[in-house]
Image (spheres, helix red, strand yellow):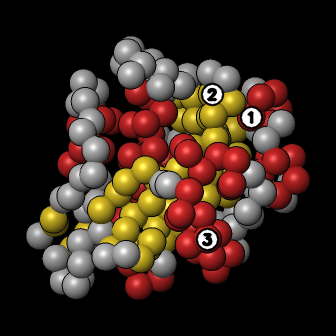
Amino acid sequence: MLHLTEDTTMTTSSTTQQSAARAVGAVESDQQDTPRVRAAAPPDLAAVEALLTASDLPLDGVKDALATFVVAESGTDVVGVAGLEVCCDNALLRSVAVRPEWRSHGVGRALVTRVIADAESRGIHALYLLTTTADRYFPSFGFRTISRDEVPAGVRETAEFREACPASATVMCRACDTTIPPN
């Protein structure tokens, strides 16, 4: 059985947003606390950086983009994170990490679904990501593999794209539903 918790009110005018509303904070009931997904705040920075470091993910640009990150929180502990780095009409989905004891409990899926819904509510045209380990995971969200040359200049200019991720990383893209009016 899944428990759902939500920190913010979300409009549900699209399939993605409806899925996000159902999946936000979803974990199996055998966990002690049910994590909730919420917008990251400045006091979360140290916990976010520690989780990303433990997951071997880059910290480049995290502090500057923290306002568009979301975290999963169990009690007072940050147990997951996902980031959106906005680049004009497109964005980079980045820094998706879940503490090992919370993996396979829907936390990562809830985080990614929330970031996709946030991107669509902002009128973002497409989401891009770089991965060295999760190229089989992200197609379930509609991402497809593309070449680096297909990525818009604004996204290619991010610190993560330019410096933090290796050239061997898989590049993926997902079109967003731009029929959703921005907030």
Residue at the far left in the pictured view: 1
* Tag 1 secondary structure: helix
What is the three-letter code of the residue carrying label 3? Ala
Q: CA distance from mark 1 to mark 3?
A: 25 Å
Relative side of 105 to 52, left or right: left
* Tag 3 secondary structure: helix
What is the three-letter code of the residue carrying label 1? Val
Relative side of 159 to 88, left or right: right
* Tag 2 secondary structure: strand
Look at the image and tell me whether residue 77 can be seen.
yes
Which residue is rendered at x = 62% and y = 21% of the image?
89
Which residue is rendered at x = 47% and y = 82% of the image?
100
Residue at the far front in the pictured view: 43
Which residue is rendered at x = 37% and y = 75% of the image?
76
2 or 3: tag closer to the N-terminus: 3
Q: Quadrant of residue 116?
A: top left
Circle nearer the viewer, 1 or 3: 3
Whether residue 28 is situated above or below residue 86 in the rendered picture: below
What is the three-letter code of the residue carrying label 2? Asn
Task: Identify residue for label 2.
Answer: 90
Q: Quadrant of residue 105?
A: bottom left
Name the spot of residue 157 as percent of width and height, x first: 83, 36
Quadrant (top left/top right/bottom left/bottom right) for the C terminus: top left
**Callouts 1 and 2 close, C-beta under 8 Å:** yes
Task: Identify residue for label 3.
Answer: 46
Sort mark 1 into few (<14), some (14-19) or many (20+) by Cα contacts within 10 Å.
many
Q: CA distance from mark 1 to mark 2?
A: 7 Å
Quadrant (top left/top right/bottom left/bottom right) for the N terminus: bottom left
Name the spot of residue 87 as percent of width and height, x first: 69, 30
Task: Identify residue for label 1.
Answer: 155
1 or 3: tag closer to the N-terminus: 3
Relative side of 66 to 123, left or right: right
